[in-house]
């Protein structure tokens, strides 16, 4: 049973890390996902509009996508924490030896943030995806299969 819990937590942590990384990598300028918990309303509106046009979403579906974007951004902000995570990781390597207690504490904090916010993110993602038409769901699957943003050149 412990092994299953560890694998589940690792999977959730990895998933949240990937979602946060994708949000960070898709950033093109000031604001957006890098702006923290409040974010850039313009970036979010553009993202919802772009995805909405690619999937041909109706108003109700766009609203569900907006809720999902809110939950993802809140989860990313919770995972990031109050300080720059790069500084926290670099802090583990300042002494002669790796600060194992600090590393365990950092992992525990990140895991707790994932556990706290994941149910809301999963529910919002399910609500959005489950309310798409079959052809829209197929477009989402194809996008995820490609592993990159829509309209990406190169």
Image: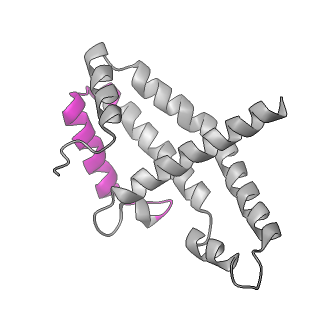
- In-front residue for pair 96/137: 96
Horizontal side of 131 relative to 19 (left or right) equals left
In the image, what residue occupies the spot 47% across and 25% down? 127
Q: Percent x, y for residue 38?
A: 47, 60
Residue 56: within the magenta? Answer: yes
Segment tinted magenta in the rendering = 36-61
Q: Quadrant of residue 89?
A: bottom right
In the picture shown, does residue 26 fall above or below 8? below
Horizontal side of 20 relative to 53 (left or right) equals right
Direction bottom: furthest residue: 95
Q: Percent x, y for residue 136?
A: 28, 22
Q: Quadrant of residue 116?
A: top right
In the image, what residue occupies the spot 74% across and 66% down? 103
Horizontal side of 97 relative to 88 (left or right) equals right
Main SS type for the magenta part?
A: helix
**Which quadrant is the N terminus positioned in?**
top right
- In-front residue for pair 81/143: 143
Q: Is residue 74 visible?
A: no
Q: Percent x, y for residue 22?
A: 41, 51
């Amino acid at each position: 049973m412990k092994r299953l819990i560890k694998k589940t937590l690792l999977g959730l942590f990895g998933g949240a890390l990937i979602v946060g990384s994708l949000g960070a990598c898709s950033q093109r300028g000031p604001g957006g996902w890098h702006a923290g918990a409040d974010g850039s309303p313009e970036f979010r509106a553009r993202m919802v509009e772009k995805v909405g046009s690619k999937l041909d979403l109706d108003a109700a579906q766009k609203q569900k996508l907006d809720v999902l974007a809110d939950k993802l951004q809140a989860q990313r902000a919770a995972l990031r924490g109050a300080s720059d995570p790069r500084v926290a990781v670099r802090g583990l390597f300042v002494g002669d030896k790796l600060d194992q207690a600090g590393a365990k504490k950092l992992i525990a904090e990140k895991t707790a943030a994932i556990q706290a916010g994941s149910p809301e993110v999963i529910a919002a993602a399910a609500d959005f995806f489950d309310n798409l038409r079959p052809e829209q769901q197929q477009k989402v699957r194809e996008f995820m299969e490609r592993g990159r943003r829509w309209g990406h050149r190169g």
